[in-house]
Amino acid sequence: MIRYKTALIGFGRIAAGYADDPSTARCYSYATHAQVLRDHPAFDWLAVVDPSAEARAAASSRWGVPVTVPSLDELPNAAAIEVVVIATPPEARAGLLDRLPSLRAVLVEKPLGVDLAAATAFVEECNKRGIAGAVNFPRRYDPELMLLANGGLVESIGRPQVVFGTYGNGLRNNGSHLIDLVSMLLGPVVDAHPVLEGRCFAEGPIAGDSNFPFNIILQNDLVAAIQPLAFSAYREVSLDIWGERGRMQFLHESLTLLNTPVADNRQLAGARELLYEASTQRSSGLGRALYLAYDNLAAVLRGDANLLCPLENGLSTMRIVENLMMHGKKRVT
């Protein structure tokens, strides 16, 4: 098998830190880029770039990375790198592509840039250079969710009638994952509007981010009503779709799928109802989705597949998020 020379830029939580969380380990066989790069046969993990001496020491001692440097300018094998995984904050990405002349592919954490202009420039530069670019929206790589997106949802519960969702820890953070999931399952987003009367609060890892309610306008007059949760109380990024023949809930941040069928109504002849006592629960494939993102990227580099979540997908989601942020500015409580 061809092995692609790979560098990991940024060595924080999604890069490696979540591997130390025992609760995460129970749900995710691959929660971090480090775990995938350690195991995946298509990627030759040559380097980590991170300004933190502690992070570099962990990359070397725990993960066996041969080269660890504080900046790309100090990367001795930069000219040989074919794949780069970008797990830095968006402000740390300026000029990154210019330092990697042999780059063939990137796997990027969202958001793609500090603002929409920077993100657009990044995508355009990748396209100009013929670099295959993928975004880590992990639900896009989950086989269970992919089946639902490709007709399985309507087959299971019928045409969607009503959609609700929750998110927290920032619109630019988890909110973007929820918006992308809505688009994946229910089709292109036509528009999105903040609910200005709703509660707005600051919480999340991205500077300047916010949490407020909003509506996603989809095709066929379908509207997804989204509400924020304070993760200081508890976490959940959920989606609740009421179809004509049943109801499907995406719970525990899409780790759990709950399907409720319809039956004859217990109190009115000739009517129907959701039969909650017959609900069935199953696990999604999200625990291995990050590994499958690398599978997809390797297949693209071999010429055997198309990108499941290209940069343009991340850019379109970011446009929706930034439009919501611009029109949803209000006093943070």
Image: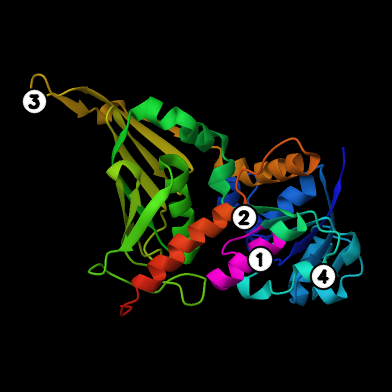
Circle 2 SS class: helix
Residue 24 versus residue 283: which sits nearer the camera?
A: 283
Q: Which of label 3 and label 4 is nearer to you?
A: 4
- Residue reaching furthest to the bottom: 331
Q: Could you tell me if the residues under marks 3 and 1 are in contact, i.e. CB atoms within 8 Å?
A: no
| N-terminal-most mark, 2 or 3 | 3
Numbered circle sitting on residue 311: 2
Q: Amino acid at mark 1?
A: Phe
Q: Which residue is mark 1?
A: 122
Residue 267, label in figure: 3
Q: Count neighbours of disc 2 (C-alpha within 10 A) and say few if under 14, some if 14 to 19, many if 20 or more.
A: many
Q: Where are the magenta residues, as a range?
A: 108-126
Badge 3 element: loop
Q: Is residue 100 left or right of residue 116?
A: right
Is 162 positioned to the left or the right of 2 in the image? left
Q: Residue at x 57, y 48 (%)?
A: 138
Q: CA distance from mark 2 to mark 3?
A: 51 Å
Q: Earlier in the sequence, mark 1 or mark 4?
A: 4
Q: Pointer 4: what residue?
A: 99
Amino acid bearing label 4: Arg
Between 119 and 214, the residue placed more toward the observer is: 119
Q: Position of residue 59 (x, y in %)?
A: 79, 63
Q: State the residue lying farthest toward the front.
A: 128
State the residue in front, 147 or 170. Answer: 147
Horizontal and vertical percent position of residue 206:
52, 72
Residue type for callout 3: Gln
